[in-house]
Amino acid sequence: MLKNRSRLIFIFTFIFCLELQAYPLFYKCGAGDRLEDTFAGPEILNQVQAMLSTAVNEEDFKQQANALCRGANECLEEVERIKALIGQSKDITTELLNVTSRYNGEIRRSQEVDQNYYDSIKSVVDQAFTLHACQEIKRTWDVDSWVGEDKNNFAVFYPKYNNYMYATGCRGRSSSAICEPNKISNYKNKIKSALLMGMDPYLAISLVWMEGGTKEGLDYLYLDPIAKFGAMGCTGTSIRSSQASDNSLNSYGTFYEIEPKVITRPALTKKLIDFQKAKGKPTSAGGTSYFCRKIYDDLGIVYDEPQDESCCLKLPFTQDSADMELIEEALIFEQARKNYQRRFSDREDPAFRIQRFNGYSRLMGAAEEVDAFRSGVDHYEHPAYGYQAMDYMVNSILTNPVIRNLVEEAEAEVEVSLGKKSDWRSIMCVEHPGGGIFQTDSNYYFNLHRDTPRLALAYTKWEKGEELSNAESKIVEQDIKALISKNIMKEDEYNVEYSKMINNYFTNHYQNRSTVGSASVQQSTYTWENLSNNDLSSIGSRILNRD
Amino acid sequence: MKGLILLLLFSSFAFAKECPSIDEDFISYYGALKDGPILGLKASISGAKKDRILCSSESCGSGGCECALYVEVDNCLTRVLEFRGSHKVLGEKADGMPLIEVIKKGDAIAPTSMKTFIWNKDRRKYVEKSK
């Protein structure tokens, strides 16, 4: 009976819940940039706000509401409730001006909202179970309904049909698409690890989706050899491969001379003590040991004395009580945490901080051939990787009940074992010192990523009759080859004089490929639009084995 | 005699070649910021001690760094290969220059790639070896 009920809720939600419009994501930041609460506002709120801003009078509003709800009474009631929330008592023309200005502000990046507004919307959200209240259902929906019958696979809602939809667990919307479901077992323990080391667990998930996809979850995170030293505070200098000796560190083909020394890091070692304690392997109350890596080898071993030819982290506990595997795991999250603590070049959008994980290219693709839709982007102005990671956060991760539940459980466990709350900075809150309540539009980062310009400077140069740089020419050629491989351009168009080829490209093809989204649409089956309700329902069913 | 010496001197000035700065070339190619940190690595590709690899520090991330290899061509260090990822100099040579293997770590969209580059004596550049 319960199983049937769960299935019914699941089908209902996936079919009806996703009348996908943008919705506001509300979040509350506390002291220390801690994320204290998030919930997705009713997506219909945006509809109602838009209707209010365009309705010339009450009658006009009613007509629009009828069209929106197709006459369904419970939908009309919902619209009225939301309208009341926005300010029914005011004259509609006055409201029109207020809403328009506020809405225009809110749809942008995070905007501060007041406590009353937050509380009143949340009260509506908590009560609502109507046709258009999909985000509310997601927020209050029973976690079990998002988990498969194996109690391990879980559903991930990501609404867009683009190259990044694999986060749902399926790499396409057709029934033949390869699916690698997210599994609770690949997240549960590592979420706790992230919290213990002060790393934003939601950001950690977003990063592994960007890097490793869904198959391994948070188990995908690892450090390259030089970063393993960096996490301990050990430094090294690059050397040429021909000069590499038996004492040099080979970090995936790049060689380093590591400085042998003993590092003392009280803040880090305190976290390691807490880490082991919370993981059920408490360290001794006193004593000293050394977590060392030979300067030519990334293997970490704990000794009771510092080692020769090694970089060692001094630990305030005994060798016997140290757990090397746990220390290695902790250092992975320590290194990830360090990466988003400061702004990039005074840019306020957190997406710029996230881009640091992938690096900043002035002209993506100048060094290596990448998928054409990703090439030609200037990350110093448009951090495409960071935009997508943020999009995963606001469109999926922060509102996923399974992930939220895992984080809440992990936080409770940490509190019980350490007697205090975990201390982590949310990427959502790093730009809101002092905390507060904010809202952001669910489409904000999606749109930024989709509309990220490609080869913009090259196009301007071409328009002015200036020469393209070598790197720009190289990327245009790669783009042309990609179009030929998709039969969008003909081989003949490539085998012509250089200037003719460039003119042809910018005159006849560039307009369809001037952004990340448009290039992806042109060269693939992805539309960068919302997945249909049927698609989402089908993906969800396959992930949860509920066909 | 004096005139001949002067002529020789002027000739040598006329032919003395000033090599362009590799740092400037690197910045110009990648469009990196002028004050952006550049990592300079000594390399040994051609056998000459001058070979260098430059990488843009800010480009380093999960897929590696944006780098360029400079070897001596016509007495000047010249950019002959642009790459991202780790490189390995192979034992096999073509026209006196070793083949270079570049491995770029993949991500959820693009798989890890391994490409071999071969010296093209006409273009005086490394080009991808055809399979």
Image: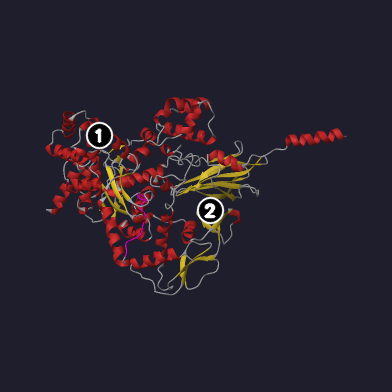
Camera sees residue A365: yes
Which quadrant of the figure has residue A486? top left
**Dots 1 and 2 on the same chain:** yes
Which type of secondary structure does the marked residue at label 2 adopt? strand
Residue annotated with mark 1: A50
Query: What colour scheme has been applied to the protein in the rendered image?
Result: secondary structure
Which type of secondary structure does the marked residue at label 1 adopt? helix
The one nearer the camera, A433 or A163, is: A433
The one nearer the camera, A336 or A490, is: A336
Q: Amino acid at mark 1?
A: Ala
Q: Position of residue A189 (x, y in %)?
A: 32, 60
Q: Position of residue A215 (x, y in %)?
A: 33, 51
Q: CA distance from mark 1 to mark 2?
A: 55 Å
Q: Which residue is located at x 46 percent, y 41 percent?
A: A380
Farthest residue to the right: give it.
B1
| Region in magenta | A420-429
Query: What predominant SS class does the magenta segment belong to?
Result: loop
Q: From the viewer's perspective, is residue A183 above or below residue A529?
A: below
Position of residue A117 in the picture relative to residue A265 (left or right)? left
Chain under numbered label 1: A
Q: From the viewer's perspective, is residue B6 above or below residue B101?
A: above
Q: Position of residue A356 (x, y in %)?
A: 44, 48
The one nearer the camera, A220 or A200, is: A200
The one nearer the camera, A160 or B70, is: A160
Q: Earlier in the sequence, mark 1 or mark 2?
A: 1
Residue annotated with mark 2: A254
Q: Which residue is located at x 42 percent, y 33 percent?
A: A485
